[in-house]
Image (spheres, grey):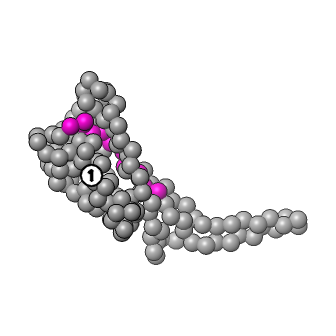
Amino acid sequence: MAVILSNVPGLAVTIPDPTVVPVTFGVGGWGGAPVRNAIVRGVSVNAAGNYQLRYTLRNYTYVYIFGEKAGDFMMTGLTFAGACNNNFAGISGVLNYYGQYRIAQYGNTVPIQIGAAGFWGFLVGVSTGIQDADSRLGQFSLIFKTLPVKGAQE
């Protein structure tokens, strides 16, 4: 499967071997199936510690640490309004993926892999729409709440 890269509007480059891409990622259920093809334009991860700071009148600072908070993972990309090659894809495919793996329906975490780092997240939101009606080009965002990684590097 080729990898398509673009950094100039209207110009794209195809790399025939996907193993040469510097960063790879995967989201459970998305897979490489032709049913869920999309142009992924961004992946972001946010993580933070769960802590509390207390300041005293004598200039002491107390730090209370409660572990890690749930993090955020977002995948954004482009999609087409209709199906590609008679497959169920495009905006319908994104909404179908959300309907199948959303937290209220699936009730479980979805595995997420970025390079060698792996974690688990709940699919909590989706946003999609048409950006350019003439070209039938749309955008999407999938929003996950990730669980703190047990035994993470200190």
- For label 1, the SS is helix
Q: Residue furthest right?
A: 58
Residue ID for mark 1: 96
The answer to whether one can see residue 83 in this image is yes
* Residue 79 in magenta stretch: yes
With 23 as the anchor, is 150 left or right in this view? right
Residue nearest the observer in this picture, 37 or 62: 37
Residue type at the position of mark 1: Asn
Could you tell me which residue is drawn at 19 percent across and 54 percent down? 32
Q: Is residue 31 depicted above or below 107 in this figure?
A: above
Dot 1, crowdedness within 10 Å: few (<14), some or many (≥20)? some
Quarter location, residue 41: top left
Could you tell me which residue is drawn at 17 percent across and 50 percent down? 35
Could you tell me which residue is drawn at 21 percent across and 50 percent down? 36
Horizontal and vertical percent position of residue 67 = 57, 72
Horizontal and vertical percent position of residue 130 = 33, 33
* Residue 50 in magenta stretch: no
Q: Is residue 124 depicted above or below 92 in this figure?
A: below
The magenta segment: 72-82
Q: Residue furthest bottom?
A: 151
Quarter location, residue 38: top left
Horizontal and vertical percent position of residue 93 = 24, 48
Horizontal and vertical percent position of residue 154 = 52, 71
Could you tell me which residue is drawn at 29 percent across and 26 percent down? 133
Q: How would you classify the magenta stretch by its main secondary structure? A: strand
